[in-house]
Image (cartoon, grey):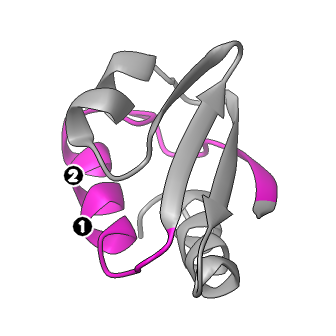
């Protein structure tokens, strides 16, 4: 299991379009993914779960992956978040 904390840099946080892009990228990997924001934990491959977090610009979230391609998954998703989905 790998954990990585990331600060959301895009203006929308993890809502609508950014959440859809995140889920699309996450589902390219076999590993399981959870996102933790404050005390809430959701499935990182579920757009409904991600949007329910209500994570906004400037918030820190933790990505937690476990599985055969966990490292590649975490690196890819962290980069996507850090670059603000650009």
Q: Secondary structure at mark 2?
A: helix
Q: Secondary structure at mark 1?
A: helix
- Residue at 67% x, 52% y is 64
Q: Nearer the viewer, residue 57 or 64?
A: 64
Q: Is residue 40 left or right of residue 13?
A: right
The residue identified by callout 1 is 24
The image quadrant where one finds the N terminus is bottom right
Disc 2 packing (10 Å; few <14; some 14–19; many ≥20): some
- Residue at 34% x, 18% y is 52
Number of marks: 2
Q: Position of residue 19 (x, y in %)?
A: 30, 45
Q: Is residue 81 above or below residue 39?
A: below
Q: Is residue 5 left or right of residue 38?
A: right
Q: Are marks 2 and 1 in contact (CB under 8 Å)?
A: yes
- Residue at 62% x, 87% y is 72
- Mark 2–mark 1 Cα distance, whole angstroms, equals 6 Å
Q: Is residue 74 above or below residue 65?
A: below
Q: Position of residue 78 (x, y in %)?
A: 64, 65
Specify the segment rendered in magenta: 3-31
Q: Position of residue 75 (x, y in %)?
A: 67, 78
Residue 35 has which mark? Answer: none
Q: Is residue 57 above or below residue 75?
A: above
- Residue at 32% x, 81% y is 28
The residue identified by callout 2 is 20
Q: Quadrant of residue 50?
A: top left
The image quadrant where one finds the C terminus is bottom left
Determine if the magenta segment contains residue 66. Answer: no
Q: Position of residue 3 (x, y in %)?
A: 79, 56
Q: Quadrant of residue 48?
A: top left
Q: Nearer the viewer, residue 11 or 73?
A: 73
Disc 1 packing (10 Å; few <14; some 14–19; many ≥20): some
């Amino acid at each position: 299991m790998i954990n990585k904390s990331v600060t959301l840099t895009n203006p929308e946080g993890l809502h609508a379009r950014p959440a859809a892009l995140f889920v699309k990228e996450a589902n390219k990997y076999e590993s399981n993914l959870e996102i933790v924001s404050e005390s809430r934990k959701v499935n990182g491959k579920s757009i409904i779960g991600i949007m329910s977090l209500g994570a906004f610009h400037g918030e820190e979230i933790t990505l937690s992956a476990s599985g055969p391609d966990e490292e590649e998954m975490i690196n890819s998703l962290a980069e996507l978040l850090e670059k603000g989905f650009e």
